[in-house]
Image (cartoon, rainbow, N blue to C red):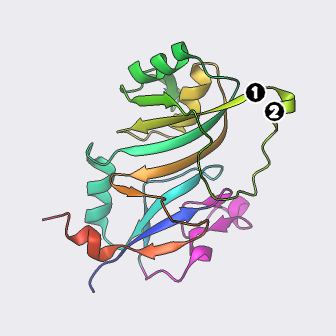
Amino acid sequence: MEHQLFLVYKPWRTVSQFLTNDSKQKKKRFLGELGDFPENSMAVGRLDEDSEGLLLITTNGKWSNIINKSALWEKEYYVQVDGDITADAIESLQKGVEISIEGKAYLTQSCKAQKLTELPQLPETLQRIRDDRHGPTSWLSLTLKEGKFRQVRKMTAAVGFPTLRLARVRIGHFTIKNLENLQVVDITESFEKLIP
């Protein structure tokens, strides 16, 4: 098999890369701790250290570029926010909000956003999240066709509802359904059928 593609449930506080030259990060957890990946494996896109959920890992730079650049590969996130998110805030997220990217103002693309009426089924996390004794929290689903640095967190903060927990649950048609925390699944065969 020339190349491989894996689905991974990246846990909270794991860095989305295999190695680092940054001495300040040497004690952190990296993707290599999740499984025995082939040489030249790379994360397709990123999830920041404080986020969890679906991550794709491949040995094929072409596949990585297809998934990262094509608007057909939507990324869906479940986001727990501080406060009971309002219909106005949801509408603002849908239309696009102004955030800062590398010190410059950036207007996010329109996206799908909706408040979740039931708690999402996510794997247990080690992240400590405050309980409702300190005020209400709510969950929403955000589906984006772009992926700027810490974009979801910046978007919810821009509408007045900071992110408490963030999990990516879908990339294109691949989802976290039946995927447990830290689990790695080889999906090379199913992906090869999708590309020319």
For the residues bearing labels 1 and 2, Cβ distance under 8 angstroms:
yes
> What number is the disc on residue 7?
none
Q: Nearer the viewer, residue 97 or 124?
A: 124
Q: Secondary structure at mark 1?
A: loop
Q: Nearer the viewer, residue 16 or 161?
A: 161
Q: Quadrant of the C terminus?
A: bottom left
Q: Which residue is mark 2?
A: 132
Q: Secondary structure at mark 2?
A: helix
Secondary structure that dominates the magenta span: loop
How crowded pointer 1 is (Cα within 10 Å; few <14, some 14-19, many 20+) is rated as few
Query: In the image, 36: left or right of 132?
Result: left
Q: Nearer the viewer, residue 47 or 17?
A: 47
Locate residue 9, reporting x and y percent: 54, 63
Name the amino acid, label 2: Asp
Locate residue 187, reporting x and y percent: 36, 73
Q: Which residue is mark 1?
A: 136
Q: Residue at x 48, y 29 (%)?
A: 114
29 up-or-down from 135: above or below: below
76 up-or-down from 175: above or below: above
Q: Residue at x 42, y 23 (%)?
A: 94
Q: Which residues are magenta?
A: 11-39
166 up-or-down from 101: above or below: below
